Image: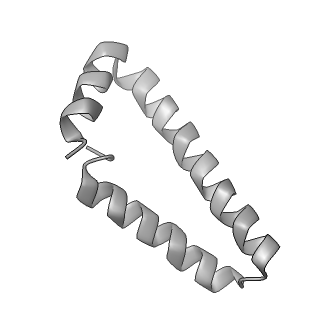
Amino acid sequence: MFAPIVILTRNAVGQPKFTKLRGQAIALHSKAITNFCNQVGIERTQRQNWIRLARDNGKRLGLLA
């Protein structure tokens, strides 16, 4: 679904810059999940499962193409 956009972006900015941007986006997303879990009182194990789920969904949606 998003794979063509991801691939075009990667080709436009170059692989090294794309990899850096992708890493920053993943870090921000993980921080958002962590902050939410801390506010709600969700334990670390469940948070890790959510981060894995987000990664797997990203692969399935083509965000990690």
> Which residue is at a point 51% across and 31% down the rendered structure image?
20
> Which residue is at a point 45% across and 22% down the rendered structure image?
17
Query: In the rendered image, which quarter is residue 58 located in?
Result: bottom left
> Which residue is at a point 24% across and 23% down the rendered structure image?
8
- Residue 40, how many percent across, how many down? 76, 78
Residue 20's place in the image compared with 2, above or below, is above
- Residue 11, how many percent across, how many down? 26, 19
Query: In the rendered image, which quarter is residue 32 located in?
Result: bottom right
Query: In the rendered image, which quarter is residue 24 located in?
Result: top right
Q: Is residue 24 left or right of residue 42?
A: left
Image quarter hosting the C terminus? top left
- Residue 27, how many percent across, how many down? 60, 48
Give the total of numbered labels: 0
Residue sitting at the far top:
12
Q: In this view, does 36 lie to the left or right of 46?
A: right
Residue nearer the viewer, 64 or 38: 38
> Which residue is at a point 37% across and 15% down the rendered structure image?
13
Q: Is residue 20 left or right of residue 41?
A: left
Q: How is the image coloured?
A: one colour
Residue nearer the viewer, 32 or 23: 32
Residue 26's place in the image compared with 52, above or below, is above
Residue 9's place in the image compared with 65, above or below, is above
Q: In this view, does 32 lie to the left or right of 20?
A: right
- Residue 37, how many percent across, how many down? 71, 73
